[in-house]
Amino acid sequence: PTIYVVTPTYARPEQRAELTRLSQTLRLVPALHWLLVEDARTPGVVATEVLAKSGLIYTLLSMETPSELRHRPGEPIWVRARGVEQRNAAVTWLRRERAWDTTAVVYFADDDNTYSVELFKEMRYTSRVSVWPVGLVGGLLYEGPLVRHGQVTAFRTAWKPQRPFPLDMAAFAVALHLLIIHPEAQFDPAAERGLLESSLLSSLVSRADLEPRAENCTQILVWHTRTEKPKLKHEEEMARRGHGPDPNVKL
Ligand code: UGA
Ligand code: MN
């Protein structure tokens, strides 16, 4: 089965670094198709260049987050979910272009997380929704499903434990055929904080359908790492003195 990896991304100083790292991880995975979705009206140069060099099978889409859903200056960063319209655009593309691919699997991989190559072996055969723990998320060393007799019976989570599916975006993969037979299912851009994953999963499966992976969810193969905002305070004064970045240098 092919794994379709859906990644929202947006232009910023660290974008090339994030996409280079992720593309080189994905390069180690067989039968993978990368759906990179730029949060902009048209795809950017960085995404285009990284993909061209990647050696991957890929599709580059663009979907701009509508202004009413975008983060506003001064607002706390968590008020609005990020990457939602981009993931939904990729799901729409999959329904239109890949409905015939009945064994395919879809994974939503943010551009800044850290992924083990082994993770993709775990999700490769997914009947409905496969799940595993995620490291360094939710204020914990890891968050993840608790498994008894091969079934997910509860979740290790400290934050809003009453969520229908207390799972991070990186904690699950979905069988494409489920998205095909539930044509209305999508990430709800209006979902309350922490309920974005639940907004999709609730329309696809119940908890009993979850397929635990990674040795009954005891192995951490993905980490919710976040990149520090680069400090660029000297660029301005350098530019003022005529020493801005060399136009030949790809940023
Ligand atoms: C957490 C979750 O892990 C995300 O899956 C969830 O979408 C996000 O919170 C949320 O609250 O919306 P976090 O590290 O806080 O992740 O979010 P980012 O990594 O900054 O953004 C998630 C994805 O959206 C990334 O792939 C990022 O490149 C993309 N993004 C971010 C955009 O496409 N546009 C933006 O304006 C910002
Ligand atoms: Mn992130």
Image (cartoon, rainbow, N blue to C red):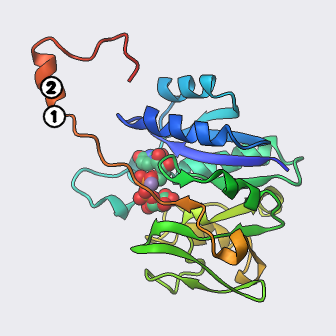
Residue 167: x, y in percent?
A: 57, 72
Distance between the Cα atoms at labels 2 and 1?
Answer: 6 Å
Residue 177: x, y in percent?
A: 83, 58
Q: Relative to the observer, which residue lies in front, 72 or 6?
A: 6
What amino acid type should be assigned to the residue bearing mark 2? Glu
Residue 170: x, y in percent?
A: 58, 61
* Mark 1 neighbour density, 10 Å: few (under 14) some (14–19) many (20 or more): few
Residue 232 seen anywhere in this rendered image of the structure: yes
Q: Relative to the observer, which residue lies in front, 112 or 37?
A: 112
Query: Disc 2 marks which residue?
Result: 236
> Residue 58 appears in which quarter of the rendering?
top right
Q: Relative to the observer, which residue lies in front, 183 or 98?
A: 98
Q: Is residue 159 left or right of residue 86?
A: left
Residue at position x 66%, y 50% in the image: 117
Query: Disc 1 marks which residue?
Result: 233
Cβ–Cβ below 8 Å for labels 2 and 1? Answer: yes
Residue 219: x, y in percent?
A: 63, 70
Return the mark for residue 115.
Answer: none
* Mark 2 neighbour density, 10 Å: few (under 14) some (14–19) many (20 or more): few
Residue at position x 80%, y 68% in the image: 128
Q: Is residue 118 left or right of residue 156?
A: right
